[in-house]
């Protein structure tokens, strides 16, 4: 049985008081003995608070980004050793919003990934095609290139710490999720490619999440697919009742 992961990406939302309330409500609503990894990725300023609030619970904390160098004159950046010193567990790398608005490319994402692994942070590596690419029929080529560029040079041992998130860009924040079959098709392809590059053991064990308009109404049908091992959730992770329903998918 592969690890199942539900991760909430809060993006650039919530005040500190709202963050405290949301985390507290999520912890209170978790079924005991649930065999799932739950990850909350609040904005940087609340990571320390979040780590304190989840003490004694099974909830893990992730950052939404990191810088590729350890230290230096990089005003405004947050580095892997800083996150490691906060005992952050996960870090999202390569989200489509970072690729689009901050022009992060494959080489930069690869450097960030290696930095995360060097500091024992588990990367959640995001990839996915744009609408135009899907319409042109190049989805598989696009995700294969993103996979190769982003994960280049990682050993099989490194890969066992990585989580992949397939997030078709046209489904993010649009209310238009991929159908379970569309997500399954791409995620099965990704798992096959991972097997080719890093071997069967990695392919069998690596969690591949789906992201893009995941909601309480569609989580169960998405998670029924064999190559969907969880979800990276944006909008619906900002309301405790919705996120709790998603965590407890059937
Ligand atoms: P969404 O975002 O659930 O709001 O579509 C998903 C994501 O960006 O990770």
Image (spheres, grey):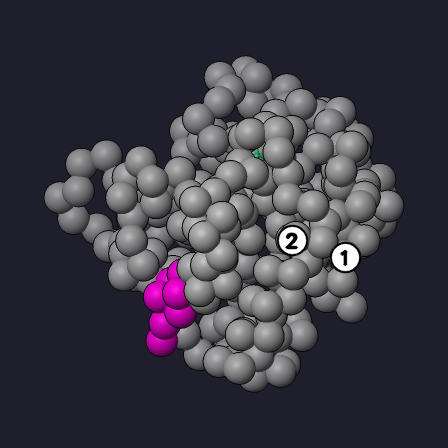
Q: Position of residue 140 (x, y in %)?
A: 50, 63
Q: Earlier in the sequence, mark 2 or mark 1?
A: 2
Q: Position of residue 200 (x, y in %)?
A: 62, 82
The part of the image, by quadrant, that contains residue 145 is bottom left
Residue furthest front as drawn:
136
Mark 1: C-beta under 8 Å from nearest atom of ligand 1:
no
Q: Position of residue 92 (x, y in %)?
A: 46, 48
Q: In screen coordinates, is 183 left or right of 220?
A: left
Q: In screen coordinates, is 94 left or right of 247?
A: left
- Which residues are drawn in magenta? 145-153
The part of the image, by quadrant, that contains residue 152 is bottom left
Q: In screen coordinates, is 165 left or right of 79?
A: right
Give SS at disc 1.
loop
Dot 2, how many residues are within 10 Å of its Cα: few (below 14), some (14-19), or many (20+)?
many
Q: Quadrant of ligand 1?
A: top right
Rendered image: mark on residue 183: 2
Residue at 64% across / 38% down in the picture? Answer: 177
Magenta span contains residue 151? yes
Magenta span contains residue 36? no
Q: Main secondary structure of the magenta part?
A: helix
Residue at 62% across / 50% down in the picture? Answer: 210
**As displayed, is residue 137 above or below residue 12?**
below
């Amino acid at each position: 049985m592969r690890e199942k992961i539900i991760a909430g990406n809060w993006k650039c939302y919530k005040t500190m008081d709202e963050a405290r309330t949301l985390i507290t409500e999520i912890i209170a609503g978790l079924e005991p003995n649930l065999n799932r990894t739950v990850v909350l990725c609040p904005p940087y300023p609340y990571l320390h608070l979040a780590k304190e609030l989840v003490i004694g619970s099974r909830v893990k904390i992730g950052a939404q980004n990191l810088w590729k160098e350890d230290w230096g004159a990089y005003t405004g950046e947050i580095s892997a050793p800083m996150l490691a010193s906060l005992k952050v567990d996960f870090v999202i790398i390569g989200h489509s919003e970072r690729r689009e608005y901050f022009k992060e490319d494959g080489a930069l994402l690869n450097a960030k990934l290696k930095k995360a692994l060097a500091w024992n942070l588990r990367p959640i590596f995001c990839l996915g095609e744009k609408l135009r690419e899907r319409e042109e029929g190049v989805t598989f080529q696009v995700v294969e290139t993103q996979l190769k560029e982003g994960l280049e040079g990682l050993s099989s041992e490194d890969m066992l710490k990585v989580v992949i998130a397939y997030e078709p860009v046209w489904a993010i924040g649009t209310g238009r999720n991929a159908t379970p079959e569309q997500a399954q098709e791409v995620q099965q392809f990704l798992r096959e490619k991972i097997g080719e590059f890093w071997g069967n053991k990695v392919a069998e064990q690596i969690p591949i999440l789906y992201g893009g308009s995941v909601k309480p109404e569609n989580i169960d049908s998405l998670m029924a697919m064999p190559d969907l091992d969880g979800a990276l959730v944006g909008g619906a992770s900002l309301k405790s009742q919705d996120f709790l329903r998603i965590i407890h998918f059937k």
